[in-house]
Image (cartoon, rainbow, N blue to C red):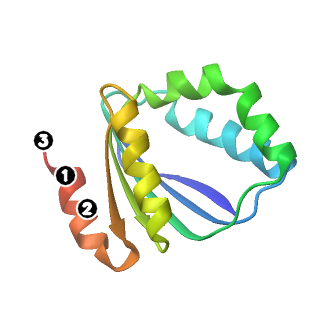
Amino acid sequence: MFTVTPNGLNRVDIELGGKLDSDAMKVALDDLAEKTKDIKNGRMLYRVNDFQFPTLGAIAVEFSRLPKLLSLICKFDRVAVLADKNWVRKVSEIEGALIPGLDIKSFELDQEAEAEAWLAEG
């Protein structure tokens, strides 16, 4: 499952759970691109619950769209990641450290109020 929900002019909320195959990845990335096309200086709340590694086909789809994904990421300044697994939270923060201009902070699933407050800062 991968759902993208617009939340105001410069924000999207994403929910990811379970396993994605190549068809689901194509739909998810197209939906994300469409719903973020007008965002500038955006914020994202990314909820990851019951994450499972995507299939190899889904990973191939993601890599084939890497240039588009990189331009999409540049539309955002802050991403709050709510995740049930510690390793997902750590990887998210490492990813934020590697992408210039993008601030990623992770939270446990029950810290949604803190994540919302952090997104509203700045």
Mark 3 to mark 2: distance in Å? 12 Å
- Residue type, label 3: Gly
Helix, strand or loop under label 1: helix
Left or right, residue 53 beside residue 38 = right
Check contact, mark 1 vs mark 2: CB within 8 A: yes
Q: Give me the residue at 34% from left, 80% from top.
A: 110
Q: Is residue 44 visible?
A: no
Disc on res. 122: 3
Helix, strand or loop under label 2: helix
Q: Which residue is label 1 attached to?
A: 120
Q: Give 89 or 113, whichever is nearer the viewer.
A: 89
Q: Quadrant of residue 82?
A: bottom left
Q: Which residue is label 2 attached to?
A: 116
Q: Earlier in the sequence, mark 3 or mark 2?
A: 2
- Residue type, label 2: Glu
**Where does the image place residue 56, in percent across and percent down from the top left?**
84, 47
- What is the residue that sits farthest to the left in this orientation? 122
Q: Give me the residue at 26% from left, 62% from top.
A: 116
Check contact, mark 3 vs mark 2: CB within 8 A: no
Q: Is residue 53 visible?
A: yes
Left or right, residue 89 beside residue 56 = left
